[in-house]
Amino acid sequence: MDQTHHQELVAKANQFIEAHHNEVNKQSYPHYHLAPRYGWINDPNGFCYALGKYHIFYQFYPYDAKWGPMHWGHATSTDLIHWQHELVALAPSEDYDRDGCFSGSAIEHDGKLYLIYTGHKVLVEAGDDSIAREVQALAVSTDGIHFEKLGVVIEPEDEGIHNFRDPKVWKDETGLFHVVFGATNLKHEGEIRQYTSHDLMHWELVSVIKEMEDNAFMYECPDFFEVNDHKWVLATSPMGQAPVGYNRQNPSVNSWQSGSFDGKTFTPDTKLYEVDHGHDFYATQSTSTPDGRRIVLAWMNMWKLPFLNYSHHWCGALTLPREITYKNGHLYQAPVKEAQSLRLSEHHVAAADSTLKSTFKTLTSNAATELQFSFKPDENSAEQYGIAIGNSIRLFVDRQTKTLTLFRLDLNATSYRALPIAWDQEHKLQIFIDNSSIEVFIDDGHDTMTSNFFGTDHTVSLYATNGQAEFKGLTVYDLERPLFGA
Ligand code: FRU
């Protein structure tokens, strides 16, 4: 390993960002979601609590607002909400990672922070990432900021395997390290493999914890963790599964399943199912907190769907961190309680002002807003009711399809996602709006919908068409903007 060469490439990226971040057009830039200071980000990587704080790394191309040879960007936080940008952690510098330091994870061990990631090397002409040699590689840091590469630790058994990536590491109670990652086997079927190690350097293939389901030829970014009730959750982003009804309508989909795990075999008690019903949610990664919660976040974009304007010099953001719990056979994702620290002011709308009849009402034009309200579909006569954001978003209850629908109306990106809802029950919505994104938590996180939008009018209105609707307990919060000027 040529550590000097790596440090030079990291320094070059840091200098470039420092010299150019003022050129970023902040028109659509998030106010409280983590986004790059300059350039492109995709998957969250290395999410962990280590050396006394939270670390989040991410797939990062620092030189342009588009995907390119992947670096690892880095930010730290003490509360999961207020993030501080740190120096670039990894740059592609060795033969085995020359075309990218792809996704991976992190773990603290013996007072040091280890990153395990995929080295990506294209075998044909540059740019064709489908025929590549992928290996799992290790890097280490004593200060949690500067990383030294330790080389390749897992190689494919067969050189015909081109998808072999995205290791997620954890340590069990006996001190044994585990990783899971996705691979396409020689039959072109997706599988998730588990390896174990005593020292993070030497790894042994132990089992295949997931085989091909519904034609998935690759499982990107698998994550595997225990939640309450001894349930294990396999979260992954399968490639190749066809849309079914309201599900899997995005070009790539993030799906989870729960089950039991004996250290070797995962026995699911559900099929893989989509956990977010919006347009932009991919490549989840989770970690546990010192107080025992399991927290997940995702890339708040999606391959092959429209992205924000490249000329703005930034692209991509991460979702709010979400706490995962298992209740009555279902996985919930609720915003972490620390998100309440973003609230600057709280406005309760009187009941008389939150019942609408064939009209609309402007609520706020603050681009950093949290909203909460409840509704009972069978008590409302309106054909459609919900909220609108400028001319970009309609989030509405729809009488014809009996769904909650998230409709993005921006030109060139017009598309809706819909979630069937029980008609005779009260539902609660918690909605986070952040300049160009909306995250909707339904019934305390029983379901979520996450999407970007592209318009610049942030006026949030309530509306009800062809009838009456009551928005119960309507509360509007103005939120802090900690990341806007960072
Ligand atoms: C998922 C993914 C990963 C890969 C990374 C490359 O979005 O395709 O499988 O490691 O992005 O940036």
Image (cartoon, grey):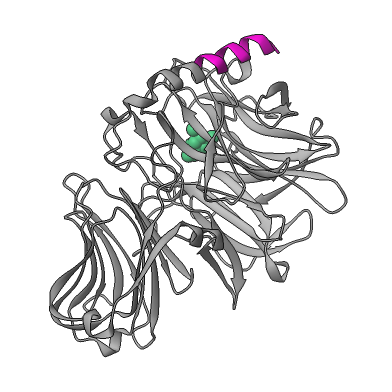
Question: x and y percent of residue 475 in the render?
Answer: 35, 72
Please state which of residues 350 and 40 is positioned toward the viewer in this rendering. 350
Task: Locate the N terminus and report the quarter of the image it occupies.
Answer: top right
In the rendered view, would you say 41 is above or below 350?
above
Question: x and y percent of residue 83 in the render?
Answer: 53, 43
For the question of whether residue 94 can be seen, the reply is no
Q: Residue at x 80, y 38 (%)?
A: 109
Residue 478, picture quadrant: bottom left
In the rendered view, does 85 fall on the left or right side of 448?
Answer: right
- Please count the marks in the image: 0
In the rendered view, does 341 fall on the left or right side of 437?
Answer: right
Please state which of residues 474 and 485 is positioned toward the viewer in this rendering. 485
Which residue appears farthest toward the front when viewing the image? 345
Question: x and y percent of residue 170 in the render?
Answer: 73, 47
Question: x and y percent of residue 54 in the render?
Answer: 63, 45
Residue 382, picture quadrant: bottom left
In the rendered view, does 153 fall on the left or right side of 217?
Answer: right
**Magenta span of residues:** 1-12
Please state which of residues 274 and 218 is positioned toward the viewer in this rendering. 274
For the question of whether residue 339 can be seen, the reply is yes
Asked if residue 10 lies in the magenta stretch, the reply is yes
In the rendered view, would you say 378 is above or below 115?
below
Asked if residue 459 lies in the magenta stretch, the reply is no
Task: Locate the C terminus and report the quarter of the image it occupies.
Answer: top left
By secondary structure, the bulk of the magenta-drawn segment is best described as: helix
Q: Residue at x 29, y 42 (%)?
A: 28
In the rendered view, would you say 399 is above or below 155?
below
Q: Residue at x 84, y 35 (%)?
A: 199
